């Protein structure tokens, strides 16, 4: 992968600050491509286990968001006395938007 220019790094830092995070530029690659391809078993094993943990937590968070979305939509649909169809659609869109943020 090509080295990022200073302007690209500045743009990435600006975007990250707008999101409320920090951007960490990738470390400079080694000039020897063979050393970059050398296997590193310890790092890979640790990253795989942390990936599995983060994947399962993401799945769990998405599952919880889906449950909340279903409950919100069910509550909206059962409350027919107080909401007209326009308000129902609006409430459903809001509930979906909140669920997608997670």
Image (cartoon, grey):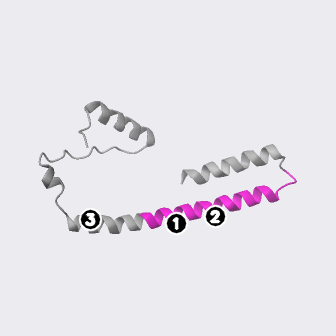
Which dot marks residue 67?
A: 2
- Between 89 and 16, the one lying in front of the other is 89
Would residue 15 be counted in the magenta stretch? no
Q: Is residue 40 above or below residue 85?
A: below
Q: Earlier in the sequence, mark 2 or mark 3?
A: 3
Residue occupying the far top of the picture: 7
Q: Is residue 28 left or right of residue 51?
A: left
How far is disc 2 from disc 1 in space, using C-alphas? 11 Å
- Between 98 and 32, the one lying in front of the other is 32
Q: Please name which of the two marks, 2 or 3, marks the residue nearer to the observer.
A: 3
Q: Is residue 13 left or right of residue 93?
A: left
Q: Identify the residue under disc 3.
A: 44
Q: Quadrant of residue 73?
A: bottom right
Tell me what residue is drawn at x 55 percent, y 50 percent. Answer: 101
Q: Earlier in the sequence, mark 1 or mark 3?
A: 3
Tell me what residue is drawn at x 40 percent, y 37 percent. Answer: 15
Which quadrant is home to the C terminus? bottom right
Q: Is residue 4 left or right of residue 79?
A: left
Which quadrant is home to the N terminus? top left
How far is disc 2 from disc 3 in space, using C-alphas? 34 Å
């Amino acid at each position: 992968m090509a080295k990022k220019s200073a302007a690209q790094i500045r743009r990435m830092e600006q975007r990250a600050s707008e999101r409320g995070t920090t951007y960490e530029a990738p470390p400079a690659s080694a000039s020897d491509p063979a050393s970059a391809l050398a296997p590193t078993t310890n790092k890979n094993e640790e990253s795989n286990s942390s990936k599995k943990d983060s994947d399962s937590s993401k799945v769990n968070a998405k599952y919880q968001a889906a449950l909340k979305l279903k409950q919100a939509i069910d509550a909206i649909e059962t409350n027919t006395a107080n909401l007209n169809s326009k308000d129902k659609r609006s409430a459903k869109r809001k509930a979906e938007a909140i669920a997608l943020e997670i």
